[in-house]
Amino acid sequence: MPREKILVHDMTVSEIEQRIGEMKKEIFSLGFRNSMRQLDNPLQIRYLRRDLARLNTALAEHKHGIHVLPGEVADSGSED
């Protein structure tokens, strides 16, 4: 079964932050289940951690003005 592809640069900042929170909870849950040997596919943890890193990178790029996400304007840090 192929994994769903996350289109990070089509998401807004609030969507990314919400998804990050969900992923952290899911990684914790999967890690706990894996320690109890109840997880069918332990690679799910790796995939989730990588997707979480992609979301964090996109959020950092937006905050630094490297790549502006849709729906919101990045803070430039200087007000004249």
Image: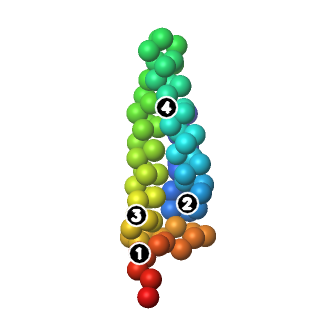
Please tell me which residue is depicted at 41% across the width and 71% down the height of the picture.
65
Q: Earlier in the sequence, mark 2 or mark 4?
A: 2
**SS state under label 4:** helix
**SS state under label 2:** helix
Q: Looking at this view, is 40 or 56 the one in front?
A: 56
Please tell me whether residue 15 is drawn above or below residue 23 in the rendered image: below
Measure the C-alpha gap from mark 4 to mark 1: 33 Å
Which residue is labeled 3 in the image?
61
Q: Locate residue 55 relative to residue 12 in the image: left or right.
A: left
Which residue is labeled 2 in the image?
13
Measure the C-alpha gap from mark 2 to mark 3: 11 Å
Q: Earlier in the sequence, mark 3 or mark 1?
A: 3
**Res. 37 visible in picture:** yes
Q: Which mark is residue 77?
A: 1
Q: Are marks 3 and 1 in contact (CB under 8 Å)?
A: no
**Label 2 Cα crowd, 10 Å radius (few <14 / some 14-19 / many 20+):** many
